[in-house]
């Protein structure tokens, strides 16, 4: 049937809207704006506000489009909000008086038949529920409502009263300009959860800045507003009313309902005469009786709020995009510092620098005497004649060569990692966002366990060289020579070949390092052949590079882990467009 089809389409549309809004809520909550950039504070506040409004109003209203309208009564300190609410129900239900603030926790008045809509956490889910206590007999307005300190401000007092029109609930909110920060924040939260506003001001305060800031927010959301001009001297009613109407029209609120409450004495209970609020009460009753009209008001406010949410999501998307770009630059600074360090380490392994000092001495001790090397320096070409000496005798242990290489290479790696950390730290401290990420932490040196990790990685590299030697030597015709020299000895020779280039050395060092490298290379060639030696050296170098890169990539995480990644800006931008389309639906 056509009616069923229409109802089904509406249900599908509502379900799709809820799904979109839940996705937006989830991704907004995932946004991490951790950098200090221009506009970030505004985006953080907007994100927090948007999440609250999604929870308090947008999602609950989309899930329950037929729920009663929530009319929030708000305004400035001393405007007479609580007195107005009491007058609307005909007896004191919320505290009114001279002591400020009088409304310290919100009171929600509803018809008994509407109780189920507000008893659970459907709307304003972060506020716990407290049942209002009914009092026998009339009580003065300055004693009505909850005792100020009886419950936390994070509570919502629910009061049933048959005088409240069924279909519309009234929520007496704290002052929007309260001296209490908590009260001001709660007032803003409640107004953001309203289907319509009943905004109370006075004849001498209607032009104050704080109320107008909120009224402009209402205009941006296209929310229905009823403005109550309270305590107006009869002689000034025409002039003040005309001026206020003009101000409303200029600010896009020409459709706002304006009700004037004259300045009259209160009775002995602190109540206004019923006739002073009769026009406002009649208007609320008319809204309550018109189900279609209530739905239109809810839809209008909802669409306006979603449109405003779209702008907020776009703002957050732009902030996330700016943070992503800034974060990429900070990350690039770090990666560049550590990449340069890897290059310097590899250069040190190729230019013969590691063949100085202890490494050279231990290698000389291993392959022959100092006299042998002095002769070798004079005539490197005689090396081939002396190779037999290496294989006829039992070579000295190669462990000291490995240890010396480990110590020398570790010193180079640690030193360059420290230089990289200092460089990255300086780059970040030159950037306001980087400075904020670092705070008081000093990351300009290596982490405490880095030297041990570097040493362990070098030993693992040396072990992998031994495995290469073992694999290459299996099945060789010259296995006797291989076994005579030993896996450790050939491994030490391979390490020497890896560090054999002599660029950067001068004078006697060139002769010594050159002779050292030739010895290692000729030994390996005698066992495996020239091509195999080149291949083994290349694999060893590649393995060393991979391990150095892994060490420094792990070390740079101390910086990069501070760059927390949230929802991609592109996704938020798409959601902003989807919200615009949703808000445009009639």
Image: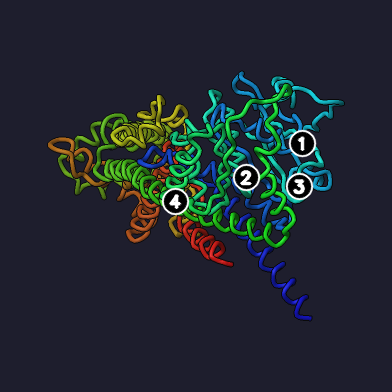
| Rendered position, 425 above or below 524 | above
Which residue is disc 2 drawn over?
193
Q: CA distance from mark 2 to mark 3?
A: 19 Å
User: Does residue 447 appear to the left or right of 89 in the view shown?
Assistant: left
Q: Visible in this render: residue 363? A: no
Q: Circle 3 is placed at which residue position?
A: 165
CA separation in Å, label 4 and label 2: 24 Å
Tell me how far mark 1 sits from mark 4, CA to CA.
35 Å
**Residue 128's spot in the image, x, y percent?**
73, 34
Q: Name the residue that disc number 1 marks.
A: 158
Label 2, residues with CA under 10 Å away: few <14, some 14-19, many ≥20: many
The residue under the point 39% across, 37% down is: 36
Nearer the N terminus, badge 4 or badge 3? 3
Inter-mark Cα distance, 1 to 2: 16 Å
- Residue 399: x and y in percent read 43, 34
Instruction: Give the quarter of the image for residue 503.
Output: top left
Disc sitting over residue 249 in the figure: 4
In terms of secondary structure, where does tag 4 sit?
helix
Mark pair 4, 3: CA separation: 29 Å
Frontmost residue, 332 versus 181 = 181
Q: Nearer the viewer, mark 1 or mark 3?
A: 3
């Amino acid at each position: 049937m056509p009616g069923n089809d229409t109802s089904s389409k509406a249900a599908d549309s509502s379900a799709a809207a809820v799904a979109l809004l839940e996705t937006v809520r989830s991704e907004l909550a995932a946004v991490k704006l951790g950098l200090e950039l221009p506009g970030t504070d505004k985006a953080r506040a907007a994100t927090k506000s948007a999440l609250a409004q999604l929870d308090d109003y947008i999602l609950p209203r989309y899930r329950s489009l037929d729920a009663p309208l929530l009319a929030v009564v708000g305004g400035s300190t001393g405007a007479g909000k609580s007195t107005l609410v009491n007058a609307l129900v005909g007896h004191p239900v919320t505290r009114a008086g001279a002591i400020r603030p009088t409304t310290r926790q919100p009171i929600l008045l509803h018809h008994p038949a509407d109780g189920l809509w507000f008893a659970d956490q459907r709307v304003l889910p972060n506020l716990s529920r407290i049942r209002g206590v009914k009092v026998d007999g009339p009580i003065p307005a300055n004693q009505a409502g909850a005792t100020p300190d009886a419950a936390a401000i994070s509570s919502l007092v629910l009061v049933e009263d048959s005088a409240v029109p069924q279909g519309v609930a009234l929520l007496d909110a704290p002052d929007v300009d309260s001296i209490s920060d908590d009260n001001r924040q709660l007032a803003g939260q409640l107004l953001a959860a309203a289907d319509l506003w009943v905004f109370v001001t006075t004849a001498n305060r209607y032009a104050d800045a704080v109320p107008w800031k909120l009224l402009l927010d209402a205009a941006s959301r296209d929310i229905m507003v009823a403005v109550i001009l309270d305590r107006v001297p009869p002689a000034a009613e025409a002039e003040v009313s005309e001026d206020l109407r003009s101000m409303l029209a200029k600010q896009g609120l020409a459709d706002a309902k304006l009700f004037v409450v004259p300045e009259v004495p209160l009775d002995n209970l602190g109540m206004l005469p019923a006739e002073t609020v009769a026009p406002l009460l009649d208007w609320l009753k008319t809204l309550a009786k018109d189900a279609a009209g209530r739905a239109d008001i809810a839809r209008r406010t909802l669409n306006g709020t979603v449109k405003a949410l779209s702008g907020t999501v776009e703002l957050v998307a732009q902030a996330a995009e700016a943070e992503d770009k800034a974060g990429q630059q900070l990350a690039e600074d770090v990666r560049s510092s550590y990449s340069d360090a890897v290059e310097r380490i590899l250069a040190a392994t190729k230019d013969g620098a590691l063949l100085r000092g202890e490494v050279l001495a231990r290698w000389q001790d291993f392959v022959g005497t100092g006299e042998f090397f002095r002769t070798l320096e004079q005539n490197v070409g005689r090396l081939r004649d002396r190779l037999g000496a290496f294989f006829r005798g039992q070579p000295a242990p190669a462990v000291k060569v490995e240890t010396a290489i480990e110590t020398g290479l570790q010193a180079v790696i640690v030193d360059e990692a420290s230089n990289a950390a200092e460089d990255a730290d300086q780059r970040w401290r030159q950037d306001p966002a980087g400075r904020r990420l670092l705070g008081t932490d000093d990351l300009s040196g290596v982490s405490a366990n880095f030297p041990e990790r570097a040493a362990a990685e070098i030993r693992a590299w040396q072990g992998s060289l031994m495995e290469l030697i073992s694999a290459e030597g299996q099945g060789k015709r010259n296995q006797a020579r291989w076994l005579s020299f030993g896996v450790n000895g050939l491994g030490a020779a391979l390490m020497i070949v890896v560090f054999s280039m002599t660029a950067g050395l001068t004078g006697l060092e060139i002769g010594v390092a050159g002779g050292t490298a030739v010895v290692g290379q000729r030994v390996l060639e005698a066992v495996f052949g020239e091509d195999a030696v080149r291949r083994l050296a290349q694999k060893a170098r590649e393995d060393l590079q991979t391990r150095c890169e892994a060490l420094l990539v792990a070390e740079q995480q101390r910086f990069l882990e501070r760059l927390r990644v949230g929802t991609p800006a592109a996704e938020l931008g798409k959601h902003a467009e989807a919200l615009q389309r949703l808000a445009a639906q009639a």
